[in-house]
Amino acid sequence: MTNCCNANGECTQGRDCPIRKQRAQEANEAYIKGFLMGQEDPLDDLADTFKALIALMFVVGGLTMIAFAIWGK
Ligand SMILES: [Zn+2]
């Protein structure tokens, strides 16, 4: 890659600077990735919480059924 930017970070190609474009794209992708990650995490937590709740209901329901089967006669 041609080094169009000098040591001070000043570019001779202005807005057409390939390094600047690449940095902008990387920053954009990192932002999108962070945005998606931020969106996914609470949904996963919610799904896990929901699954745990359903599992708990099955356990409680099963224990209730067993309790009725043993003592409910
Ligand atoms: Zn440059």
Image (cartoon, rainbow, N blue to C red):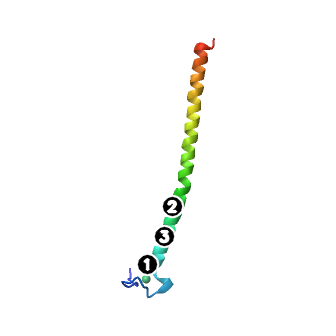
User: Is ligand 1 within 8 Å of the beta carbon of the residue shown at mark 2?
Assistant: no
Q: Which residue is mark 1?
A: 19
CB within 8 Å, label 1 to label 2 = no
Q: Residue 35: give x, y in percent of width and height.
A: 54, 61
Judged from the image, the secondary structure of the residue bearing numbered disc 1 is helix
Picture layout, residue 2 above or below residue 25 = below
The residue pinned by badge 2 equals 34
Horizontally, residue 26 falls left or right of residue 73, namely left
Foreground tag (1 vs 2): 2
Give the position of the N terminus as an image quadrant. Answer: bottom left
Which residue lies most toward the top here? 73
Residue at left offset 60%, top offset 16%: 69
What distance separates the C-alpha of mark 3 from that of mark 1? 12 Å
Considering only order in the chain, which callout, 2 or 1, is on the residue closer to the N terminus?
1
Answer whether labels 3 and 1 touch (C-beta < 8 Å). Answer: no
Name the residue that disc number 3 marks: 27
Image position, residue 18 (x, y; %): 45, 80
Figure quarter occupied by ligand 1:
bottom left
Which mark is nearer the camera, 3 or 1?
3
